[in-house]
Amino acid sequence: MTKDAPVGSVAAAATTAAGSRRITGAVWGALLIVYVVWGSTYLGIRIVVETLPAFLSAGGRFITAGLLLAALVAWRQGPAALKVTGAQLRSALLVGVLLLLGGNGLVVLAETAVPSGLAALLVASLPLWMVVLRTATGDRPPGRTLFGVGIGMAGLAVLTLPGLSGDVQLWGVGLVVLAALLWAVGSFSASKLPMPKNAFAGSAYQMLAGGTANLVVGFARGEQHGFHPAEVSTGSWLALGYLVVFGSLVAFTAYAWLLQSAPLSLVSTYAYVNPVVAVLLGTLILDESLTWPILLGGAIVVAAVMVIVSTERRK
């Protein structure tokens, strides 16, 4: 997943009534940041993995972002803001591993085999998996929501066609779908577990846990063997820096502020804008091909997400 910060704890902290939030110029500015920056992270990942190891780069990225965020919280709110209970810390660590190793690390690895635009469209299935998890735990989503899930699953089937035809490596497609599922599990768990009361501090712990887990997996896979920093391209270093600063800090801060300041129905539109941005950037900058399965399957998935989001926000 490539959203670059764990949104579960932040979403749980957003308790202001949506109807009382005003749509100001600042709201639109923050929303534009989330649209463009989070949509562009798929392109950034694709450039990073051209010359950097997948899990080691993801680990370094999230540990750096986590330390920066923790320092920012301590500076702005005081060191006491980072204090958590043992139960809260354990929950944050678990959610961080699910989101940033399972949800994001697998996407980073998959983008060595699949185009960035296709990865973004597959990740857009996240709301579908959230509904599946709710249903599996006894919740009763509206019929319209279940209808949206059915449409979305059909879209995912169409998106796998490039892999079945050999145009894209099928294992990469499978990894992205698994990553979306694990991100959904992490987000769902965050709403059920005792998370840190300070959402920013909790997210810093999640990024540190997820980053460490990515490093462990990277070293276990032997990614350090044959890796020479001097052989890393300037583009990969710049893309990694972009992901740390803009993807993990700027866009996340904008998203967290939006959850507190704007109608949730408006904020949630990122779920179907991000993949469109990712596909356009992949096509324009990396010259990724737009095949008919990607266009058709992507349109079906985005439509399904729109159905689910529009239905859920009425509740």
Image (spheres, rainbow, N blue to C red):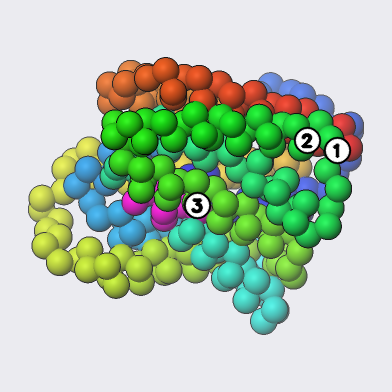
Residue shown at the point (53%, 35%) measured from the top left: 156
Residue shown at the point (31%, 24%) measured from the top left: 288
Q: Is residue 75 visible?
A: no
Stretch in magenta: 103-109
Q: Which mark is residue 121?
A: none
Residue shown at the point (66%, 29%) measured from the top left: 151
How far apart are labels 3 and 1 at the CA level?
25 Å
- Which image quadrant for residue 252? top right
Marks 2 & 1, CB-CB < 8 Å contact: yes
Q: In this picture, is 114 found above or below 73? A: above
Question: What element does badge 3 sit on?
Answer: helix
* Mark 3 neighbour density, 10 Å: few (under 14) some (14–19) many (20 or more): some
Q: Please state which of residues 137 and 218 is positioned toward the viewer in this rendering.
A: 137
Q: Please state which of residues 13 and 29 is positioned toward the viewer in this rendering.
A: 13
Residue 178: x %, y % from top left: 50, 52
Q: Which residue is mark 1?
A: 142
Q: Which residue is mark 2?
A: 145
How far apart are labels 2 and 1 at the CA level?
5 Å
What is the three-letter code of the residue carrying label 2?
Thr
Q: Residue furthest front?
A: 165
Earlier-in-chain disc, 3 versus 1:
1
How far apart are labels 3 and 2 at the CA level?
21 Å
Q: In this picture, is 236 found above or below 84? A: above
Looking at the rendered image, the quarter that the C terminus falls into is: top right
Residue shown at the point (36%, 48%) measured from the top left: 171
For this view, does 143 lie left or right of residue 62? Answer: right
Question: What element does badge 1 sit on?
Answer: loop
Q: Is residue 295 visible?
A: yes
- Magenta run includes residue 165: no
Q: Which residue is mark 3?
A: 178
